[in-house]
Each structure stands twice: as C-alpha cells, then as structure tokens.
Image (cartoon, rainbow, N blue to C red):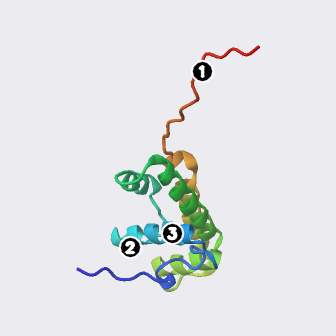
Amino acid sequence: MTQKALTRQDMPPKFMPANPDKDEASRLGRFARWMYDNHLQWVNPDLATYRDHLLENLSPRTVKAHLSTVRKALQRVARDRDYLYRIAAHYAPDSASLHDLKPLVDEFTHRIDNATHPDESAVKTITVQDESDGFTGG
C-alpha cells in the first residue's frame, strides 16, 4: 500500500517553519505522518504516545531532539488563533459566532500547551560522568 505524500496543506499553517533545516523538516514531517496515520487531531496532540513510538527505534537522545522540535512547532500552532478559530468553526454549529467559538479555541490552546509541557513527555537519559583516574594532583 502506498502512503499519501504529506504536504504543507496537510499540516497547520504555522507548524512547519518557512525555511526549515533538514533536521526540522525530517522531524516535523515524521510527526505529521504519525498524526495523519493515527487519525489524530492537531488540537489534541499526544506527545507521550509519540515519544513511546519513537523510543521503539531511536535512542533517547534522538527522541529528545525530535520532541523539542515538535514542541516548538506545536507552540507556533497554539499561537495561530486564525487556524484555531477555523478548526473550532468546523466542530461548532453553523450558527456559532466568534464569541461562541472562543471557549473552544481557548480549550484547544490549553490542550496544546499541556501536551507540549516537557513534563508530559519527558525522556529519561543516562549521563555518564568521567570516572576518577586516581590522580589527586600536586
């Protein structure tokens, strides 16, 4: 089965930076593919599950880098009120006013803020300190 090639139109407008470097493009594209394949909503990301998915094949240090990039991108999405209002309008009744949509937009922002908090998807890494070589100086 051939996977649909994702484009910027499959992502929130501010998710991908204008000129991402190759690492950003790869990390964000991988997250977008995971969101798409799992039929998840951009306004309710689950970075803990994504972290666990990445840890199946990547080192903890690499997963930390991926999550850092994705958190920054999702925070850009949370600040894009126009996008969030368009999504809210999709879920609300046709007669909903902007005033009616605001609580939903605020909820989306809150969900993204919570999901992107580092404590919600922390990655444990082991730091190995240099061992003493027995030299005491002098």
Gap in angstroms between the C-alphas marked 3 and 1: 41 Å
- Establish if 108 lies above or below 49: below
Q: Nearer the viewer, residue 59 or 55?
A: 59
Q: Is residue 63 left or right of residue 113?
A: left
Q: Type of residue at label 2?
A: Tyr
Give the label on residue 132, or none.
1
Mark 3 / mark 2, whichever is N-terminal: 3
- What is the residue that sits farthest to the right in this orientation? 138
The residue pinned by badge 2 equals 36
Q: Secondary structure at mark 2?
A: helix
User: Which is closer to the viewer, label 3 or label 2?
Assistant: 3
Give the label on residue 28, or none.
3
Residue at x 38% of width, y 73% of height: 36
Q: Is residue 111 left or right of residue 49?
A: right
What percent of the width, then of the height, locates residue 87? Answer: 51, 77
Residue at x 47% of width, y 72% of height: 29
Mark 3 / mark 1, whichever is N-terminal: 3
What percent of the width, then of the height, locates residue 73? Answer: 58, 67
Quadrant in which residue 137 is drawn: top right
- Look at the image and tell me in which quarter the N terminus lies: bottom left
Residue at x 61% of width, y 71% of height: 102
Q: Type of residue at label 3?
A: Leu
Q: Secondary structure at mark 1?
A: loop
User: Which is closer to the viewer, label 2 or label 1?
Assistant: 1
- What is the residue that sits farthest to the front in this orientation? 138
Q: Secondary structure at mark 3?
A: helix
